[in-house]
Amino acid sequence: MDNETAGTRLPDMVDIPRNIRTRREQLGLTRADVCARAGLPLKWLVELEAGDAPLSRAALGGLAVALETSVTALMSGTFGTQRTIRDNPSVPDVRSLIRMSENECRARLATHEVGRLAGGMEHVPWVLPVNYMSDGRDIVFTTRPGSPLAHVRGTVAFEVDDVDRYARLGWSVLVIGVAEPVTDPVEIARLKEAGRDAWPARHGELWFRIHPGRVTGRRLRPRPSRR
């Protein structure tokens, strides 16, 4: 995993604050220097290094760029001889939206449990949040009887994103597919077992499956730093 693909692995918040501080001191940078590079608030970085501030996947990528290292190194604490942005002047000093491959989109979908389902475009459009999980190449979700989603059928759009307003980084994945109910008791039992740690089971819940026809996504490339 590199700076641009932060988001497919959950960070370890026990070691990362220490690793960030170690790398910053290794470069001879003050906290203010790092915040100026990454466009982050100083108070947040002070709290982060003390282990008192949350760190999202997107912010981790931005810090890696500001500290001229990789996300992998910040997670592992291994700071050997590394190629930095100063060694690669061809890196543009601009943020840009990068199209993600389908595999990267699916990897990011697997890190979340809540998305937005949209449908009804031919009548009255609607968008509703749903708990979900990946099942092979499909997306499965549950709803209660009587919910507006209880009768969802046919083509739908499903969207998941992760945005960090401090680091001004993020990504978004969009799935266009066909939704259908899951009615096989054996299949439902398997899905319940697979999802029992994802969200609480509800009596009489209805299960649905989305067969993706198109999976696309974009991420915002972190802004390279300069010295």
Image: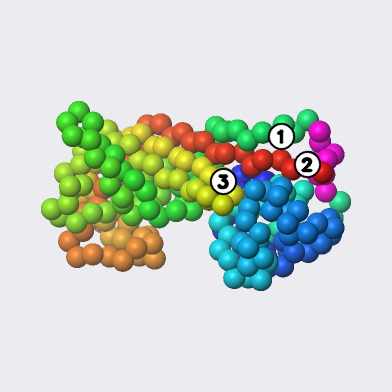
Residue 168's tag is: 3
**Quarter of the figure that contains the C terminus:** top right
Check contact, mark 1 vs mark 2: CB within 8 A.
yes
Which secondary structure, mark 2? loop
Looking at the picture, which amino acid does disc 2 mark? Arg
Q: Nearer the viewer, residue 37 or 118?
A: 37
Please name the residue that numbered disc 2 is placed on: 226
The span shown in magenta is 82-89
| Spatial separation of the CA atoms under disc 3 and disc 1 | 15 Å
Q: Nearer the viewer, residue 59 or 150?
A: 59
Looking at the picture, which amino acid does disc 3 mark? Arg
Residue 138 is covered by the magenta coloring = no
- Colouring used for the render: rainbow
Image quadrant in which you'd find residue 56: bottom right
The residue depicted at 61 percent of the width and 61 percent of the height is 44
Which secondary structure, mark 3? loop
Image quadrant in which you'd find residue 181: top left
Q: Residues within 10 Å of mark 3 (few under 14, many from 20)?
A: some
